[in-house]
Image (cartoon, rainbow, N blue to C red):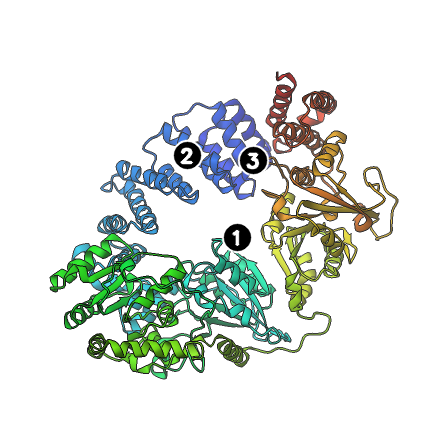
């Protein structure tokens, strides 16, 4: 009976056949898919490359496509781009490749090239052919989405309209199409006849944000939010927080946002975080914002006790990280606006969850308990239209930043405004303007001779549509003045040359109305029956100007005309703001923060006070740089627990501990569970199936600190290791790593005598130049710095990931390659004390067999070649030639001595192509002129 080959034998045969040009494309796809599913994408890439180099096939473009996908997934964007283009060169009608290449180019911030690829799909894919219609639609939708981002609104709308005419049953496309029309003031927004879709369907697909400006009906706004939650938010996420609180002495308040940058939310909250009373609360910022480098972002981040970046984490991992920090109250600053991550909240990482500022309406999300409001903003009759309970502030729902500078007041001439006109200012976003409100503004202009409307014209289509409507109403278009965008301080200064701000309805201004009041410009609002239509009234009550709140369109229009005809009255209102601005409720930020903390105390779920063994971090700890302790662990629960204890015992006060556990069972997770409950600075990542290097990378990728130290799961640290090393690291920025003598211990923790390669390098603390030490390492072929446990290193000194040197990833020599990369630009400090304990035991380094020794020989040769080729070390050609001659001879002799054993190795254990490549590189250096 013929024995069925094992999966490994099938894979090995596939590699052999691929190299010989004998592997069918079906077997290629099947084998590569199995490798990818097993987490072996690098091997799958190698298989595709072997097949493509050995096989001439009319369908090779399909293999190129699959290879490009894998290259993109593993971070080789340049390789992916080239491979997609190779596929298209063979098959210019390959729609999937155009679509993927466009997506890649967009991610690489090359939008025009992305648009070009998707336009080619429109030329190739025929919408009348059922098999090609999907590609045509996808290209149209991609074009519309990216054109909208680029603010080319008419073109974006056209693409989405074409898509909807081909397939009206696309709610997500309708969502964007509706909001695009709002942004252009293209009325009616719900042009059912034009698009061929019933108005009810258009309304049903309107986003929660767009609905705030589309309807003043609170039931419609709640329905829009519920629709989003139903379609986009997971409903079966396991709850991460329990019903009980944590018993912290101070409440841990977490703010969750991607708008900790130059954004309206940060404009309002910049002062909030620093004003919190550190005797009452500890402030966390969970952040996936753009690093825009703005002073505003720096202020916001500086106000947190703990700034935690979660941009690289999945929603579930981010939620688990928040849970690990034992946040008492999580405040979401997004709602359902652009960039929101509602699935984080769906996991219930905090026992109390609150929404604030992001979406001025209901979120429809059951995982959110409260919405911060005030009694005017959210009266009892509106509560049935909210899924959240109101958390009322006693005076106003909105915080403000009193440090916003106002620039020099410009002249009216500089703003293209007439000197003697009454200037109505309407700076709310264009999408908030409705035809009903704009027509009222035109009637106001008619009744106040010589007055002008000063508004924002974000795009040419807005300017065209509004001036055309003015002309049709008999208003000279010159009386509509459009303001361009200017820096924040100059923007605030502009308000000072206007006479009255006109608010919109049903979506009032929020930040913009506060901006006007901060600059002492009176605001006239029309209050409606929704949260978003009552913001202006709340803000006016907080500056003691309730007389500027109207409750109908007719009263709004009449009041605007009255003030336009009585400029003295408008100036009196301005004087009121000038005299009371710093004492009124709206801008009394310290008082607001005390009120907010009182409210948090009311809703917090208090647990049993924590034992003294696990006190909350001291506020001053956060002033120290954060050090990330990285513990990759595999099947060693006993030793790993000892390692974790030594990390928790560190005297350095600001640490996080990131554990990546790729164990084959749950013993380590169960062993660590009590520690996770007691220590919020531990991040535990269960990662079965990861390779050792991937486990290393998983720790690294989820860490936040500027300084890092791996702690292998069978090693230990001296309690003062990090404090001692950080005291040296912080002396000067040229220091990239600090290492020390490592004391060998046996399996029971008893001291052992040094073995070759672990002796003390120096008898006293020594600063060593990076280039000198790097050349010593390469010359001696020895790791003089030590294992990862020993070394504290600076994140900024590692341009790629752990294990990279000169752009090449190493696995067997991942530690040495990292040290060389750091030493190529930074110096090293050696400490003679034993700050690390390196355990020698029977279960260690099971993989230290022939494959590792072979790979190590090849890697040493590769690092030597790259160090010279890139000019990092060993620049003297005569010296490097002598070294290469010796290394090549040694390497080839060693490989020859084990050639019989090599024949039995699996392909992934010994890549002959790698050896051939480095030998060719070495020979090129040897024989170069």
Side of 906 relative to 459 (left or right) = right
Q: Which is more toward the observer, 669 or 487? A: 487
Residue 532 visible in the displayed image: yes
Q: Nearer the viewer, mark 3 or mark 2?
A: 2
**What x and y, as percent, mark residue 881?**
69, 21
Label 2: which residue?
84
Label 3: which residue?
43
Q: Earlier in the sequence, mark 3 or mark 1?
A: 3
Which element carries disc 2, helix, strand or loop?
Answer: helix
Which element carries disc 1, helix, strand or loop?
Answer: loop
Q: Which is more toward the observer, 745 or 800? A: 800
**What x and y, as percent, mark residue 717?**
77, 54
Label 1: which residue?
312
CB under 8 Å between discs 3 and 1: no
Q: Nearer the viewer, mark 3 or mark 1?
A: 1
Q: Quadrant of the C terminus?
A: top right
Q: Residue at x 30, y 66 (%)?
A: 497
Picture layout, residue 214 above or below residue 261: below
Q: Residues within 10 Å of mark 3 (few under 14, many from 20)?
A: some
Q: Residue at x 87, y 52 (%)?
A: 750
Q: Nearer the viewer, mark 1 or mark 2?
A: 1
Side of 523 relative to 267 (left or right) = left
Q: Quadrant of the N terminus?
A: top right
Q: Residue at x 17, y 72 (%)?
A: 448
């Amino acid at each position: 009976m013929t024995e069925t080959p094992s999966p490994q034998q099938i894979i090995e045969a596939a590699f052999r056949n691929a190299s010989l040009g004998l592997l069918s494309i079906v077997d290629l796809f099947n084998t590569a898919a199995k490798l990818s599913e097993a987490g072996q994408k690098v091997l799958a890439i190698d298989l595709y490359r072997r097949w493509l180099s050995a096989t001439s096939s009319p369908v090779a473009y399909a293999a190129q496509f699959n290879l490009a996908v894998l290259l993109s997934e593993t971070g080789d964007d340049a390789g992916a781009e080239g491979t997609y283009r190779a596929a298209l060169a063979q098959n210019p009608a390959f729609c999937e490749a155009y679509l993927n290449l466009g997506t890649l180019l967009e991610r690489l911030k090359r939008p025009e090239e992305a648009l070009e690829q998707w336009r080619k799909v429109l030329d190739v894919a025929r919408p009348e052919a059922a098999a090609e219609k999907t590609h045509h639609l996808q290209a149209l939708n991609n074009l519309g989405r990216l054109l909208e981002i680029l603010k080319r609104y008419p073109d974006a709308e056209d693409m989405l309209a074409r898509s909807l005419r081909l397939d009206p049953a696309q709610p997500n496309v309708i969502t964007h199409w509706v909001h695009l029309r709002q942004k252009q003031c293209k009325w009616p927004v719900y042009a059912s006849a034009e698009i061929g879709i019933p108005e009810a369907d258009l309304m049903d697909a309107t986003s929660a944000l767009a609905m705030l400006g589309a309807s003043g009906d609170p039931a419609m706004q709640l329905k829009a939010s519920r629709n989003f939650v139903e379609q986009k938010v997971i409903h079966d996420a396991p709850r991460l927080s329990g019903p009980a609180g944590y018993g912290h002495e101070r409440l841990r308040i977490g703010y969750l946002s991607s708008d900790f940058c130059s954004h309206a939310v940060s404009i309002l909250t910049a002062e909030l975080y620093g004003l919190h009373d550190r005797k009452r609360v500890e402030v966390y910022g969970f952040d996936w914002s753009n690093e825009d480098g703005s002073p505003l972002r720096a202020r916001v981040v500086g106000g947190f006790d703990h700034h935690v970046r979660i941009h690289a984490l999945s929603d579930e991992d981010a939620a688990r990280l928040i849970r690990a920090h034992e946040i008492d109250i999580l405040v979401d600053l997004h709602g359902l606006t652009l960039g929101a991550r509602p699935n984080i909240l769906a996991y219930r990482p905090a026992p109390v969850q609150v929404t604030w500022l992001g979406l001025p309406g209901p979120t429809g999300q059951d995982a959110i308990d409260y919405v911060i409001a005030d009694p005017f903003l959210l009266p009892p009759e509106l509560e049935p239209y909210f899924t959240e309970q109101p958390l009322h502030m006693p005076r106003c729902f909105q915080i403000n930043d009193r440090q916003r500078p106002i620039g020099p007041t410009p002249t009216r001439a500089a703003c293209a405004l007439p000197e003697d006109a009454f200037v109505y200012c309407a700076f709310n976003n264009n999408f908030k303007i409705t035809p009903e409100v704009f027509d009222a503004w035109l009637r106001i202009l008619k009744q106040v001779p010589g007055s002008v409307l000063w508004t924002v014209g974000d795009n040419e289509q807005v300017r065209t549509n509004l001036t055309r409507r003015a002309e049709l109403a008999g208003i000279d278009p010159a009386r509509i003045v459009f303001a361009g965008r200017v820096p924040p301080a100059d923007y605030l200064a502009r308000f000072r040359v206007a006479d009255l701000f006109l608010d919109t309805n049903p979506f009032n201004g929020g930040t913009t109305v506060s901006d006007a009041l901060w600059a002492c410009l009176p605001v006239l609002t029309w209050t409606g029956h929704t949260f978003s239509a009552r913001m202006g009234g709340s803000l006016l009550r907080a500056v003691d100007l309730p007389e500027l709140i109207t409750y109908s369109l007719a009263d709004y229009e009449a009041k605007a005309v009255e003030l336009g005809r009585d400029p003295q009255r408008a100036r009196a209102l301005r004087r009121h703001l000038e005299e009371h601005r710093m004492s009124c409720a709206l801008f009394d930020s310290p008082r607001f923060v005390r009120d907010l903390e009182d409210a948090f105390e009311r809703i917090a779920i208090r647990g049993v006070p924590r034992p003294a063994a696990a006190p909350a971090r001291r506020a001053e700890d956060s002033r120290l740089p954060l050090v990330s302790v990285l513990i990759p662990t595999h099947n060693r629960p006993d030793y790993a627990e000892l390692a974790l204890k030594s990390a928790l015992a560190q005297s350095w006060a600001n640490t996080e501990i990131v554990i990546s556990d790729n164990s084959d069972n749950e013993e380590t997770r169960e062993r660590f569970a009590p520690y996770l409950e007691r220590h919020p600075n531990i991040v535990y990542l269960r990662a079965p199936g990861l390779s050792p290097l991937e486990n290393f990378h998983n720790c690294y990728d989820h860490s936040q600190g500027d300084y890092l130290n791996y702690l292998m799961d069978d090693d230990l640290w001296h309690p003062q290791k990090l404090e001692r090393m950080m005291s040296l690291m912080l002396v000067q920025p040229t220091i990239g790593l600090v290492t020390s003598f490592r004391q060998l211990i046996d399996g029971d923790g008893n001291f052992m005598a040094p073995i070759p390669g672990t002796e003390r390098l120096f008898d006293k603390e020594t600063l060593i130049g990076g280039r000198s030490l790097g050349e010593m390492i390469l010359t001696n072929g020895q790791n003089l710095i030590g294992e990862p446990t020993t070394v504290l290193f600076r994140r900024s000194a590692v341009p790629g990931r752990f294990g990279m040197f000169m752009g090449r990833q190493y696995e067997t020599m991942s530690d040495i390659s990292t040290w060389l990369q750091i030493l190529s630009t930074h110096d090293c400090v050696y400490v003679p004390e034993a700050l690390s304990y390196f355990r020698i035991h029977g279960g260690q380094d099971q993989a230290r067999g022939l494959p590792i020794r072979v790979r190590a020989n090849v890697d040493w040769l590769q690092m030597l070649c790259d160090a010279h080729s890139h000019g990092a070390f060993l620049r003297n050609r005569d010296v490097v030639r002598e070294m290469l001659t010796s290394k090549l001879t040694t390497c080839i002799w060693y490989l020859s001595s084990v050639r019989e054993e090599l024949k039995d190795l699996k392909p992934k254990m010994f890549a002959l192509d790698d050896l051939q490549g480095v030998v060719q590189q070495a020979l090129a250096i040897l024989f170069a002129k």
